[in-house]
Structures are given as C-alpha cells and as structure tokens.
Image (cartoon, grey):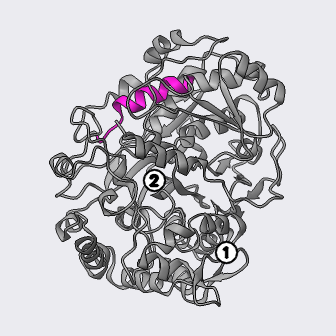
Amino acid sequence: MLTRCLFTCALALLMTPLLLPADRPTAQPGKAGRSVTVANNGIVATSHPLAAQVGLDVLKKGGNAVDAAIATSAAMGLMEPTSCGIGGDLYAIVYDAKTKKLYGLNASGRAPGKATLAYFKEKNLKDIPTKGPLSWSVPGCVDGWDELRRKFGTKDFKELLAPSIAYAEEGVVVPEVIAGHFKGSQKKLAADPGLRETFLVPDGKGGRRPPRAGELFKNPHLAKSYQLLATGGRDAFYKGEIAKNLVALSDKVGGLFSMKDFEDHKSEWVEPVKTTYRGYDVWEIPPPGQGIAALQMLNLLEPYDLKKMGPTSSDYWHLLVEVKKLAFADRAKFYADPVFAKVPVKELISKEYAKERGKLLNPKKALTNIPAGDPKLSNSETIYLCVVDKDRNCVSLIQSNYMGFGSGLAAPGTGFGIQNRGCLFALDENHANKLEPGKRPFHTIIPAMVTKDGKPFFTFGVMGGDMQPQGHVQVLVNLLDFGMNVQAAGEAPRVEHMGSATPTGTPEKPKGGTIRAEPGIPDEVVKELESRGHVVERVRVNSGGYQGILINPKTGVLLGGSEARKDGAAVGY
C-alpha cells in the first residue's frame, strides 16, 4: 500500500499541466492533421525531428535498423532529457529479416544489493520515495544499446554516438513540447546541483532558468560521457568513470549503489509474447513490463463488433474502459520480475481466460469493484522510437527515466539524470512485486509490434505510464477496426482511464476511477458515459505520444505516422 503522502505526490504529478502550445490542433476521429510519411528505403520515427534525422542519416550511410535505433536513442537522450537518457532503462522488440524471427530485449536495471525490505523498515518507510537516491535502480540503457549492437548492429559506438556528441557540443534547438516539459520541471532542476548545472541556462540576472522553445541547448557534460562510451564501450559506464561518479554521488547523498551493482548488471534477451486480434499477431514484452495488459484488453474486445459501434459511440468507449479495468486489476496483482515471482503469463493472455473475465462486463453499467493499481504508475516521462530499413529489419524501442528527470538527481559532470524506476517496487513482503536485492521492478515502458502471416506489418508504441497499454489498444482498434491510416490512428481522440484508489485500501474515490476525455470525444458520448456510472473529466490532451511504421502488405511501401501530442516526426527516404 502507498502512504497517503505518496498518493498525494503522485496525484499532484498527474495534475501538473502538460505545457503544450496554445495552437496545438485538436484531433478528430479518422482525420489526420498531417499526411502519412511514405518511403521505400527506410523510415525513422520518434518524438524529436532532429533525432529522427540522426537515425535516417545512419540508414543512408548503410547502417541497418538497429544501428539507426541506437543512434536515435542516443540523440533523444540529449534532445529530450526530460523523458529519457542513459540514466534510465530500455526495452526493445527487433524483427530480424535474416532469421525472420522476433527478439525481445529487457534492458532494465535491478535493485541495488543493499536495497532490502529490512532497510526500509528500519528507516520507518512504508513506501519507496519517488525522488532521491532510494528510488534508484541500476540504469540499463547503455547495456541495452550494446546488446542490440553486438547481436544485430553493423556500426560501433564511435560512429553511432558521433552525431549526438556534435549536437551536445554545438547545441540543439529546443522544440515547443519539450520546452514545456523543461519549464514544468524548473523547481526539480533547481534543487539539485548536478541537474542545475546541466539543464538550466543563465538567465542574465545571476540566476538560471530552463531553456525556451527556439533556443539552443548545449550539454558538454553529456558529450564527455558519450565520448567515454565511444572509446570505452559499455564498460565505461558500468565499470569505469561513469559508474564511479554515480557510486560517489550515492555515497554522498545516502544512496544504496555499489560498484558491484554496476559490474554485475546485464540485460536479458526474452521471447516476446502474443495474442491474435482480427487475424493479426500482436507482440509485447513479457513482465516485469505491462505489455500483456494490452494483450488482455484486446482479447476482451475481440468478441465485439467494434467496427459497427464506430469510433464516436458511447458503447465503444464504455467497453474500452471496462476491459481496461479488468486487465489492470490483474496487472496490480500479478505483474512482477518472473525471476523472483511466478507470473501466469500464458494464462493471463489466453482466450479462455478472457472469456471468463468477459462475463463480468456489463454493456450499460460501469464496474466499480475492480481493485485499482498503484497511482504512481499513472505518470511517466518516456520516449519511443521505431525504425524499418530497406531490408525490412524492424526495431520497436522505448526508453525512459520514469518520471520527468527521474529521481531529481544527477552526478555532477555526467550530463544526465538518474531514473527513479525503483520507486515502483512494493514494500509489502507478500506482494509479487516486493523489493528484493537484484530484482527488476514492475515496468511501465512497452514496445510493440504486429505481424501478419509471420511477416512484419506494424511497428509502433505509445508513451505515458498507464496510458501505454490503453494507447496500444486504441491505436490498433483505430487501425484494424475503424480503418484509419497509420497517421490518423495515432492522432485520433483518446480517453485515458485512471484509477484513484486511496493508499489505505478504502474504496476508490470516485468508485470506478475517472475517464480523461480529449476534446474530440463528443459531448453526447460524455453524457451517456456518465449515465452509465462513469466519472468523466474533460482534458485538452492526454498523456503519451505515438509513433508508428506500417509496411503495406501489398506493395511493401513504408507508411509512417507521428502525432501532435509530441514534437516528433516520421522521416524517410
């Protein structure tokens, strides 16, 4: 259980406004605000246009999709540091055109060896703080890059990191949405010397402020860290100067890191798991990530004629929210590191289980007695990218610090914040996701891929905590049921259902949680949802951001989408 103060903290994070430009367009069902990106040789899509261009340049110079994904991810660590960086974790799904197989990579970090339930009990803490050194787990991003490069890549770190090093030294222009995230994090950045020196710029009055939209942002400290990786490889992070700096900071501020935690770190190649939906295979990474929640939701939706309901019907939105409640109830109870806990993945994503759970659905009344998940899971800052190359190798990659700038701490001189992913452990000794040394916490970030008859069809992802599995499902329904194109499927109006359980285990307030509805959801739909027992809140924009690349099965042409909730772009050649 969360303490009341932690619940309040998480709720405050959720209520922080998304600082988007005032003229950001409102999507309408099936109507895209920009054209689909079309290309034949390759497409890169992510939430900063210059980062996408970095990856595209790699493709043009003969690199493959994995090479481009690594270079793009590195660029995003510089260009959108509010959300990601080498202080965070990484997950990926790769389709390899040579072997014609899918590969899953879990590049998430583990709890420090000194992080025990007894330690937190001695500290009289009932929950792991969302800020500070006790929220740390070992960052997995750099080892994830190395695993991808060694297994599938053709370029070395020196070449792949060179564009980001140059941008870090010479400066990169800050776009609108990312500038808003900088501004919203000003207090957090000002409170820590390492973050302050890196991410706030002189204000001309003797103080420091966040960089603004249209201004150049430089990060020479990150350039130095990337240069260490370019010459020393992943060991420069886990065994060299960077790890030593992180452990030194840990010792100074009361953290639990040791050099052994970094030296022992390794990523894990895993088998992606799937369900079928409308004749397509939908693939996700198994726990400790939450990807199977999307598969559970799709299983529950499949028996219904969603196409007949249509994207503006109250019947569709009601059903979507209800199946989310069922899937997330299982998420709260079962999802954990399978090395430490038995997670019944096969059973949870089976059609038989969905059939039984589906009996709980009432088409005219909202469920109110479904256990809610952890409110901390509802907010996260994440980037997603996808790449498809000329040989049709595909990469679906997601990378995150968890909350904006992670734990609110950075080792001076390193140029990156350290994630707070460890705060997602439970301190209940009977919980599957309980804290244990060397254990990976429950994870929100999930890449996805869709295949048809064993061939890659759609590589995509949606960012934003709880929104990720909900977003995966809404994008796929838009694409496969409602016939939207790859651009419109991501731009279409969304809802995000948010549970609001109190930390003491008392009933939800309001019971059944809250639906956050974007402007494109018709007023009559909102009224009908309320009549069925839902609590609906109007919001200008929901969390997340979508990128996707679809391979036309008839022509083989690549179709890319990137929507307006982020600064991003899909670029191709």
How far apart marks 1 and 2 lie (CA) works out to 26 Å
Q: Mark 1 or 2, which is nearer the eye? A: 1
Query: Residue at the spot x=39%, y=58% of the render?
Result: 420
**Image position, residue 74 (x, y; %):** 50, 71
Disc number for residue 174: 1
Q: How many numbered marks appear?
A: 2
Q: At label 2, which amino acid type do we have? A: Ala
Query: Residue at the spot x=41%, y=49% of the render?
Result: 103
Name the residue tied to disc 2. 92
Q: Quadrant of the N terminus?
A: top left
**Image position, residue 421 (x, y; %):** 38, 54
Q: Which of 503 and 453 is in front in this view?
A: 503
Q: Quadrant of the C terminus?
A: bottom right
Q: Compared with residue 238, is residue 9 higher up or lower down, i.e. above or below?
A: above
**Image position, residue 315 (x, y; %):** 72, 18
Q: Is the magenta stretch mostly helix, strand or loop?
A: helix
Q: Give the range drawn in magenta.
A: 323-337
